[in-house]
Structures are given as structure tokens and as C-alpha cells.
Image (cartoon, rainbow, N blue to C red):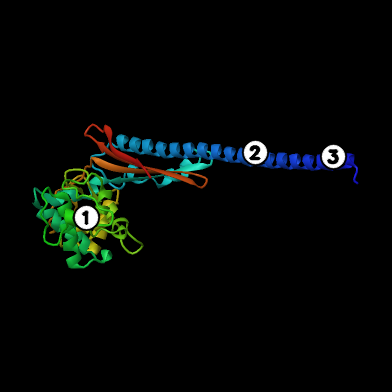
Amino acid sequence: MKNPITNKKGVALILVLLMVSVIVVLTLQLNVSSRSQVHEAANLGDGIRVLYIAKSGLFAGMGLLSEDRGDADTLNEAWARTEALTEQSKSYFDGGYLELVIEDETGKININKLVAGNDFNGAIKGLLTRLLTQPQFQIQEQEIEDLLNAIKDWIDADSEVTATGAENAYYQGLGKSYAVRNGPMESIDELLMVRGVTRELFYGTAERPGLARLLTVQGEGSVNINTAPKEVLRALAPSITEDAANRMDDYRRNPANSLTETSWYRRVPGLENTAIDSVTVVTKSEHFQIAAKGHLGTMKRTIRGIVKRDSGKKLSVVAWRLG
């Protein structure tokens, strides 16, 4: 028969080993939990920092626009040339930097002006047709007509389908159904909800530009000829070819040339007799989009804002969003 005292010692040893094991496991778990909390706190802090870097960019963009005192808005002004700010910002933020891009919304085509009442606005339809007919968009003539009909039906107030367009019956038959707007678009992103507008068409690809940077929902429909993308320049008149648009762009980027008059394009060789009469062109702008992206390590945060500038250079925020 075994000695009971020895048995008790063995049981005690086992209990001690179990307790030590439990303590070790709990200690390791506590260590992991503590490290996780430290990392979460650091990430939260960095997230706040990168957000404020982006916010500072938004305010910097508004400052550039409010300080603009020129008689015309052009691509030669400080608000349109923010590339150097990225390098400078690296000395402002410890371990982070800022990217800032300001676009003139008045240089784009107002998609809401495609409709006048419940009918097409012929001038804007012609403008959009010339835009989408450009080779880089790779869209067939019938596809363009279908697309414009669908956009018209999205915007106009009635529920009648325009030729090859689309009204509620189409959108409510989708897997994830929704109702047609039947009114002006509130954001250009809303265009993605319209039949025929793919993400590739909206955002663009390596081979073709995206509609997102050529269209807007802001303003009264005038186009600033000084800041319009070259694709929009080509759409202003049937006689403006790709080569002519390039020459117009070269002319307006030369600081020595005056751009206060809307007819300056007639001073460009080969465009002396060109007439832009399908849409009102201007040289001053009211609406601008500011995109400010903050960088901190691997973190990125972007703030986009649409601002309106009145005649007294006072700015008001029309819309803004994160991401």
C-alpha cells in the first residue's frame, strides 16, 4: 500500500502546476489584450490626425479661392496649381502630408440642364452628344441616344418613357429596386443610378476619361472656357477638333494671354471663324470642388467639398463628404 503522505504531495504538485499554467495563460492573454488596446488607441489617434490633415486641406483650398482677385478664373491661378503644396505639407505634418486638388465646376457641363420642362434642352443635348461621340469614350451612336434618353427620364418630372429611356418600371424591376428621381440630380454620383451609366463610364479607365470630371450638377449651365477640360472644349462646337482643343489649351495656359473675354479662342490660329452658340460660355466661376486627402503612414482619409464663391469672394459650403 502506497504512503498517503506521498499521494498528497503528488496531488499538491499537480495542483500547483495547474495553477501556474492558468496564471501563465491569463498573463499571456492580458499581455495580448493590453497590446491590442495600445494598438487600437494608436490607430484611433492616427485616424484622428489623418482626418485633421484632410480637413486642413479643405480649409487651405477655401483660403486659396477666397484670396483669388483676378478678373477671370484660369488654370494659371494658385488654386489650380496645388502640386507644390504636397511637398511643402511634408514639413507641416509630422510623418504625414496632404494632397489637394481643386476643380472648377463651372468648367463642366451641368447634366441637370439636359431637361427643360419635360423636354430635351436641344443645346445641352447637342453638347453632350458631341462629348460622348469623341473616340476615347468608345460609345456607339445608338448607345449615346439610349443613354441621354435614360438621363432625361431620370430628371424630367413626368413618368412617360422617352423613346429608349427608362422610368420607374425599369428601376423597380431590378434586383435591388429603387425609384427614379423625376427631378434634378442632387449629386453627380447619382448618375451611377441611371441605366447605362457603368462605373467605367463614370469614373473612367486608362483608355478613356470619366464623366465624373466632365459633368456637374452645380450652376446655371454656363461653361467656363478658361478651365473646361479639353473634352468639354471639343464639345462646345462641331468645328472644334482634338487638335484645335489642344491649341486652345496651350493658348489659355500661356500667362501672357488675356482670358477675360469669352471670345479669346478666336485669337487661336485656325479658330478665327469658330462660333460657340450652343451654350453660354463665361470666364468667371462660382462653384468649385475641393478634394483634400490626408496621408499618415499607411492611413489615408479624403474630404470632398463643393463650395460656392459669391461676387465678394465669400465662400459657402454647398456639400461635403468623407471618402
Label 2 – label 1 distance at C-alpha: 53 Å
Badge 3 marks a residue whose secondary structure is: helix
Amino acid carrying label 2: it is: Leu
- Residue situated in front as seen by the camera: 138 or 179: 179
Camera-near label (1 vs 3) is 3
14 vs 71, left or right, is: right
Sequence-wise first label, 2 or 1: 2
Task: State the residue lying farthest toward the front.
Answer: 1
Q: What residue is drawn where x is 17% and y is 62%?
A: 146
Type of amino acid at the residue the image marks with label 3: Lys
Secondary structure of the residue carrying tag 2 is helix
Residue depicted at x 65% and y 41%: 29
* Residue 88 pos. (x, y %): 46, 42
Tell me whether circle 2 and circle 3 mark residues in contact (CB < 8 Å): no
- The answer, for residue 230, to whether it is visible in the render is yes
* Image marks 2 and 1: residues in contact by CB distance under 8 Å: no
User: Which quadrant of the figure has residue 54?
Assistant: top left
In the rendered image, the vertical position of residue 176 relative to residue 287, given as above or below: below
Disc 1 from disc 3: Cα separation: 79 Å
Residue annotated with mark 1: 171
With respect to residue 287, does 165 lie above or below? below
Name the mark on residue 8: 3
